[in-house]
Image (cartoon, coloured by chain):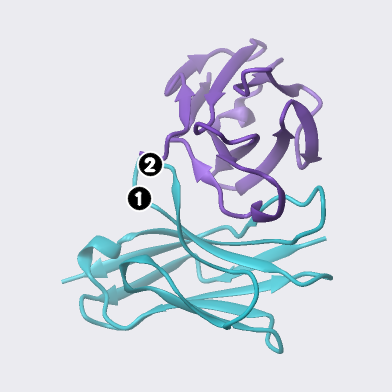
Amino acid sequence: AQSVTQLGSHVSVSEGALVLLRCNYSSSVPPYLFWYVQYPNQGLQLLLKYTTGATLVKGINGFEAEFKKSETSFHLTKPSAHMSDAAEYFCAVTSTQAGTALIFGKGTTLSVSS
Amino acid sequence: DSGVTQTPKHLITATGQRVTLRCSPRSGDLSVYWYQQSLDQGLQFLIQYYNGEERAKGNILERFSAQQFPDLHSELNLSSLELGDSALYFCASNRGGMNAGELFFGEGSRLTVL
Protein backbone atom coordinates (compact mmCIF):
# COMPACT_ATOMS: atom_id res chain seq x y z
CA ALA A 1 0.00 0.00 0.00
CA GLN A 2 1.09 3.55 -0.62
CA SER A 3 0.64 6.58 1.58
CA VAL A 4 1.66 10.22 1.86
CA THR A 5 2.32 12.35 4.91
CA GLN A 6 2.40 16.10 4.65
CA LEU A 7 4.07 17.70 7.63
CA GLY A 8 2.24 20.82 8.74
CA SER A 9 -1.36 21.47 7.84
CA HIS A 10 -0.72 25.22 7.74
CA VAL A 11 2.35 27.13 6.63
CA SER A 12 2.60 30.91 6.77
CA VAL A 13 5.28 32.94 5.00
CA SER A 14 5.87 36.55 4.10
CA GLU A 15 5.84 37.72 0.52
CA GLY A 16 9.31 37.20 -0.94
CA ALA A 17 10.26 34.51 1.57
CA LEU A 18 11.18 30.92 0.80
CA VAL A 19 8.33 28.46 0.60
CA LEU A 20 8.96 24.92 1.85
CA LEU A 21 6.16 22.38 2.00
CA ARG A 22 7.12 18.95 3.27
CA CYS A 23 5.99 15.59 1.93
CA ASN A 24 7.07 12.08 2.86
CA TYR A 25 5.79 9.01 1.12
CA SER A 26 5.60 5.30 1.69
CA SER A 27 5.68 2.90 -1.22
CA SER A 28 6.83 -0.69 -1.68
CA VAL A 29 7.43 -0.10 -5.39
CA PRO A 30 9.10 2.78 -7.25
CA PRO A 31 6.75 5.71 -6.82
CA TYR A 32 5.46 8.38 -9.09
CA LEU A 33 5.13 11.59 -7.06
CA PHE A 34 3.07 14.69 -7.65
CA TRP A 35 2.20 18.06 -6.21
CA TYR A 36 -1.21 19.54 -6.90
CA VAL A 37 -2.57 22.95 -5.96
CA GLN A 38 -6.14 23.86 -5.13
CA TYR A 39 -7.31 27.47 -5.17
CA PRO A 40 -10.52 28.36 -3.35
CA ASN A 41 -13.66 26.99 -4.98
CA GLN A 42 -11.69 25.25 -7.69
CA GLY A 43 -10.56 21.76 -8.54
CA LEU A 44 -6.99 20.58 -8.20
CA GLN A 45 -4.38 21.31 -10.84
CA LEU A 46 -1.00 19.74 -11.37
CA LEU A 47 2.04 21.73 -10.23
CA LEU A 48 4.75 19.19 -11.04
CA LYS A 49 5.50 15.49 -11.14
CA TYR A 50 8.35 13.03 -10.75
CA THR A 51 8.25 9.73 -12.60
CA THR A 52 11.81 8.71 -13.51
CA GLY A 53 15.07 10.43 -14.39
CA ALA A 54 16.16 13.76 -12.93
CA THR A 55 15.30 13.95 -9.25
CA LEU A 56 14.88 17.73 -9.25
CA VAL A 57 11.73 18.60 -11.10
CA LYS A 58 10.48 22.02 -12.02
CA GLY A 59 6.85 22.93 -12.24
CA ILE A 60 4.61 25.85 -12.97
CA ASN A 61 4.70 29.20 -11.17
CA GLY A 62 8.33 28.82 -10.10
CA PHE A 63 7.83 25.76 -7.89
CA GLU A 64 10.21 22.82 -7.82
CA ALA A 65 10.56 19.60 -5.85
CA GLU A 66 13.32 17.11 -5.25
CA PHE A 67 12.83 13.36 -5.03
CA LYS A 68 15.07 11.90 -2.31
CA LYS A 69 14.72 8.14 -2.23
CA SER A 70 16.93 7.70 0.85
CA GLU A 71 14.70 10.06 2.81
CA THR A 72 11.43 9.00 1.11
CA SER A 73 10.72 12.69 0.63
CA PHE A 74 9.42 14.96 -2.09
CA HIS A 75 9.43 18.46 -0.61
CA LEU A 76 8.06 21.40 -2.56
CA THR A 77 9.95 24.70 -2.66
CA LYS A 78 9.74 28.13 -4.19
CA PRO A 79 12.51 30.70 -3.65
CA SER A 80 10.24 33.72 -3.31
CA ALA A 81 6.59 33.58 -2.29
CA HIS A 82 3.96 35.66 -4.01
CA MET A 83 0.55 36.59 -2.68
CA SER A 84 -1.03 34.58 -5.48
CA ASP A 85 0.62 31.41 -4.12
CA ALA A 86 -1.85 31.29 -1.23
CA ALA A 87 -3.73 28.03 -1.74
CA GLU A 88 -3.90 24.45 -0.54
CA TYR A 89 -1.18 22.12 -1.73
CA PHE A 90 -1.45 18.37 -1.98
CA CYS A 91 1.31 15.82 -2.35
CA ALA A 92 0.31 12.55 -4.02
CA VAL A 93 1.78 9.16 -4.87
CA THR A 94 1.03 6.41 -7.30
CA SER A 95 2.94 3.73 -9.17
CA THR A 96 2.95 1.92 -12.47
CA GLN A 97 1.25 -1.11 -10.98
CA ALA A 98 -2.11 -1.87 -12.53
CA GLY A 99 -5.00 -0.90 -10.32
CA THR A 100 -3.04 1.77 -8.46
CA ALA A 101 -4.78 5.10 -8.13
CA LEU A 102 -3.42 8.45 -7.03
CA ILE A 103 -3.27 8.71 -3.23
CA PHE A 104 -3.21 12.19 -1.72
CA GLY A 105 -1.86 13.58 1.49
CA LYS A 106 -4.13 15.65 3.73
CA GLY A 107 -2.90 18.90 2.27
CA THR A 108 -1.04 21.98 3.47
CA THR A 109 -2.62 25.40 3.42
CA LEU A 110 -0.14 28.09 2.45
CA SER A 111 -0.79 31.63 3.64
CA VAL A 112 1.26 34.54 2.28
CA SER A 113 1.32 37.85 4.07
CA SER A 114 2.52 41.19 2.76
CA ASP B 1 -10.77 25.11 -17.43
CA SER B 2 -9.68 21.47 -17.09
CA GLY B 3 -12.25 20.16 -19.55
CA VAL B 4 -13.88 17.96 -16.89
CA THR B 5 -17.51 18.87 -16.21
CA GLN B 6 -19.37 17.98 -13.04
CA THR B 7 -23.04 18.47 -12.27
CA PRO B 8 -24.64 19.59 -10.09
CA LYS B 9 -22.24 22.08 -8.50
CA HIS B 10 -24.26 22.21 -5.30
CA LEU B 11 -26.78 19.81 -3.84
CA ILE B 12 -28.68 19.95 -0.58
CA THR B 13 -30.66 16.94 0.54
CA ALA B 14 -31.91 15.15 3.64
CA THR B 15 -30.66 12.10 5.49
CA GLY B 16 -31.84 8.85 4.01
CA GLN B 17 -32.13 10.23 0.50
CA ARG B 18 -30.32 9.20 -2.67
CA VAL B 19 -28.44 11.46 -5.09
CA THR B 20 -26.59 11.05 -8.36
CA LEU B 21 -23.53 13.06 -9.30
CA ARG B 22 -22.52 13.26 -12.92
CA CYS B 23 -19.14 13.68 -14.57
CA SER B 24 -18.14 14.24 -18.18
CA PRO B 25 -14.41 13.61 -18.69
CA ARG B 26 -12.09 15.53 -20.98
CA SER B 27 -12.44 14.69 -24.62
CA GLY B 28 -10.44 11.56 -25.35
CA ASP B 29 -9.92 10.53 -21.74
CA LEU B 30 -10.84 6.94 -20.98
CA SER B 31 -10.29 6.92 -17.22
CA VAL B 32 -12.57 8.53 -14.66
CA TYR B 33 -11.76 8.81 -10.98
CA TRP B 34 -13.99 9.83 -8.07
CA TYR B 35 -12.66 11.46 -4.92
CA GLN B 36 -14.36 12.67 -1.76
CA GLN B 37 -12.93 15.72 -0.01
CA SER B 38 -13.92 16.50 3.57
CA LEU B 39 -12.29 18.53 6.32
CA ASP B 40 -11.57 15.56 8.55
CA GLN B 41 -10.63 12.92 5.96
CA GLY B 42 -8.96 15.05 3.31
CA LEU B 43 -9.03 13.76 -0.29
CA GLN B 44 -10.14 10.14 -0.31
CA PHE B 45 -9.99 8.04 -3.45
CA LEU B 46 -13.29 6.29 -4.05
CA ILE B 47 -13.17 4.46 -7.36
CA GLN B 48 -11.70 4.44 -10.87
CA TYR B 49 -13.20 3.36 -14.17
CA TYR B 50 -11.35 2.77 -17.40
CA ASN B 51 -13.31 2.54 -20.62
CA GLY B 52 -16.40 1.30 -18.82
CA GLU B 53 -14.69 -1.20 -16.54
CA GLU B 54 -13.93 -0.78 -12.84
CA ARG B 55 -10.12 -0.48 -12.54
CA ALA B 56 -9.40 0.36 -8.92
CA LYS B 57 -11.38 0.68 -5.73
CA GLY B 58 -10.58 2.79 -2.70
CA ASN B 59 -12.51 3.75 0.41
CA ILE B 60 -15.92 3.61 -1.18
CA LEU B 61 -18.83 2.77 1.10
CA GLU B 62 -21.28 0.03 0.15
CA ARG B 63 -24.00 2.69 0.05
CA PHE B 64 -22.13 4.33 -2.81
CA SER B 65 -21.84 3.00 -6.34
CA ALA B 66 -20.55 4.27 -9.64
CA GLN B 67 -20.54 3.40 -13.28
CA GLN B 68 -19.05 4.60 -16.53
CA PHE B 69 -21.25 4.61 -19.59
CA PRO B 70 -20.36 3.84 -23.23
CA ASP B 71 -20.03 7.56 -23.96
CA LEU B 72 -17.46 7.59 -21.10
CA HIS B 73 -19.39 9.86 -18.77
CA SER B 74 -19.64 8.59 -15.23
CA GLU B 75 -22.16 8.76 -12.42
CA LEU B 76 -21.63 8.38 -8.70
CA ASN B 77 -24.71 7.24 -6.80
CA LEU B 78 -24.93 7.94 -3.08
CA SER B 79 -27.79 6.32 -1.18
CA SER B 80 -29.14 6.22 2.37
CA LEU B 81 -27.33 9.47 2.93
CA GLU B 82 -25.96 10.36 6.33
CA LEU B 83 -24.80 13.67 7.76
CA GLY B 84 -21.21 12.50 7.42
CA ASP B 85 -21.56 12.17 3.66
CA SER B 86 -21.55 15.94 3.37
CA ALA B 87 -18.44 16.69 1.35
CA LEU B 88 -17.04 17.92 -1.92
CA TYR B 89 -17.01 15.16 -4.52
CA PHE B 90 -14.47 15.48 -7.29
CA CYS B 91 -14.31 13.73 -10.59
CA ALA B 92 -11.02 13.56 -12.46
CA SER B 93 -10.02 12.06 -15.77
CA ASN B 94 -6.99 11.14 -17.85
CA ARG B 95 -5.97 8.93 -20.74
CA GLY B 96 -5.32 6.07 -18.31
CA GLY B 97 -2.54 3.54 -18.34
CA MET B 98 1.03 4.42 -17.45
CA ASN B 99 0.29 8.12 -17.17
CA ALA B 100 -2.24 7.39 -14.49
CA GLY B 101 -0.99 10.00 -12.08
CA GLU B 102 -1.60 13.18 -14.04
CA LEU B 103 -5.25 13.80 -13.36
CA PHE B 104 -7.46 16.61 -14.61
CA PHE B 105 -10.05 17.61 -12.02
CA GLY B 106 -13.48 19.04 -12.32
CA GLU B 107 -14.63 21.80 -9.98
CA GLY B 108 -16.51 19.38 -7.78
CA SER B 109 -20.04 18.78 -6.57
CA ARG B 110 -20.69 20.05 -3.06
CA LEU B 111 -23.14 17.81 -1.24
CA THR B 112 -24.82 18.97 1.94
CA VAL B 113 -26.88 16.44 3.87
CA LEU B 114 -29.24 17.96 6.46
The image's mark for residue A42 is: 2
The relative height of residue A81 versus residue B20 in the rendered view (above or below) is below
The answer to whether residue A15 shows anywhere in this view is: yes
The relative height of residue A114 versus residue A69 in the rendered view (above or below) is above
Query: Colour in which chain A is shown?
Result: cyan
Label 2 resides on the chain identified as A
The image's mark for residue A39 is: 1
Can you name the residue that lies furthest to the left here?
A114
Which is nearer the eye, B74 or B7?
B74
The answer to whether residue A20 shows anywhere in this view is: no
- Say whether residue A37 is left or right of residue B60: left
Image spot of residue B36 (x, y percent): 60, 38
Label 1 resides on the chain identified as A
Q: Residue at x 68, y 71 (%)?
A: A25
Image spot of residue A105 (x, y percent): 60, 60
Would you call the spot at circle 1 few (<14 residues within 10 Å), some (14-19), or many (20 or more)?
some
Would you call the spot at circle 2 few (<14 residues within 10 Å), some (14-19), or many (20 or more)?
few
Can you name the residue that lies furthest to the front here?
B28
- Say whether residue A27 is left or right of residue B105: right
Q: Amino acid at mark 2?
A: Gln
Image spot of residue A83 (x, y percent): 21, 65
Image spot of residue B58 (x, y percent): 77, 42
Image label count: 2
The relative height of residue A41 versus residue A25 in the rendered view (above or below) is above
CB within 8 Å, label 2 to label 1 = yes
Q: Amino acid at mark 1?
A: Tyr
Q: Which chain is purple?
A: B
